Image (tube, rainbow, N blue to C red):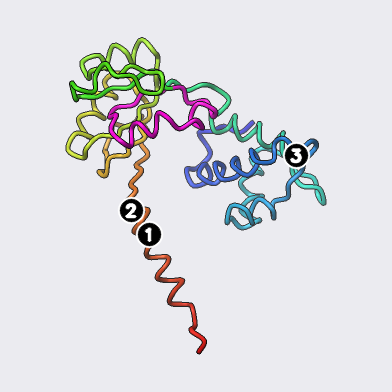
């Protein structure tokens, strides 16, 4: 079993892609998958796939590939997905409600322990089995639930303050959906999800594809 501290962030991101493919084939008895197949389905070169998976030892067999079930289990352990992660959400607007209702989070081990909002009209309402709490209760609830992950779905102006509140409460990792970059203390992980950036990148790639299309008259 590799030391996850020695796995680089780019490798970790590719492992997430491999996990998705493996998960879709986990029900196939005695299934095997080659590095070429994994690469084709994730957009990663097969040589890079073999290099990434080499840290798990000799799981692959020449001419056969990797056992799907064994590799799936090893990757889940390396990614920390073999445990349940208590998670809290701040911001219960449209994005926040959608995040709470998304079933794959719980299926993959992310258990929402609480949801918070600064809007007094929202506090006390129930969403996806949780009663929305006020921000005044955040620190106590986070500590009581032993949550380590926080999701932020608040307006940009509030994101930095909310992030600091989560860090002060003991949160160790933040998934930020507010369109602003967060700069947190060392030892606190942050992943920024900006839908506008993603759409801009998509529009750019569409233009590149269109530029390569030759119109036949």
Residue hosting label 3: 67
Inspect the magenta stretch and tell me whether residue 90 lies in it: yes
Between disc 3 and disc 2, the foreground one is: 2
> Is residue 29 toward the left or the right of residue 157 in the image?
right
Gap in angstroms between the C-alphas marked 3 and 2: 37 Å
The answer to whether marks 3 and 2 mark residues whose Cβ atoms lie closer than 8 Å is: no
Q: How crowded is mark 1: few (under 14 residues within 10 Å), some or many (20 or more)?
A: few
Gap in angstroms between the C-alphas marked 1 and 2: 6 Å
Find residue 65 and report its horizontal and vertical position in percent.
Answer: 76, 47
Q: In this view, does 215 lie above or below 63?
A: below
Decide which of 166, 158 is in the foreground and name it.
Answer: 158
Q: Residues within 10 Å of mark 3 (few under 14, many from 20)?
A: some
Find residue 174 and report its horizontal and vertical position in percent.
Answer: 35, 32
Residue hosting label 1: 201
What is the span of residues highlighted in magenta in the rendered image?
Answer: 87-111
Between disc 1 and disc 3, the foreground one is: 1
Q: In this view, does 90 lie above or below 68?
A: above
Gap in angstroms between the C-alphas marked 1 and 3: 35 Å
């Amino acid at each position: 079993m590799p030391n996850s501290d020695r796995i680089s962030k780019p490798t970790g991101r590719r492992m997430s892609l491999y996990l998705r493919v493996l998960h879709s084939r986990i029900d196939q008895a005695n299934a095997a998958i080659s590095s070429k197949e994994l690469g084709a389905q994730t957009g990663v070169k097969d040589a890079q796939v073999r290099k990434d998976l080499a840290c798990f030892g000799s799981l692959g067999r020449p001419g056969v590939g990797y056992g799907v079930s064994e590799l799936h289990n090893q990757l889940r352990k390396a990614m920390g997905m073999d445990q349940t992660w208590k998670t809290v959400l701040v911001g219960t607007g449209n994005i926040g409600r959608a995040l709470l209702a998304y079933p794959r989070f719980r299926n993959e081990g992310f258990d929402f322990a609480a949801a918070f909002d600064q809007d007094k009209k929202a506090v006390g309402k129930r969403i996806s089995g949780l009663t929305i709490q006020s921000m005044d209760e955040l620190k106590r609830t986070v500590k009581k639930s032993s949550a380590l992950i926080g999701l932020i779905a608040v307006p940009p102006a509030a994101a930095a303050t909310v992030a600091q509140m989560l860090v002060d409460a003991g949160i160790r990792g933040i998934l930020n959906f507010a369109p602003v970059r967060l700069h947190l203390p060392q030892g606190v992980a942050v992943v920024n999800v900006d839908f506008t950036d993603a759409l801009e990148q998509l529009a750019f790639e569409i233009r590149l594809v269109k530029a390569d299309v030759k119109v036949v008259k």
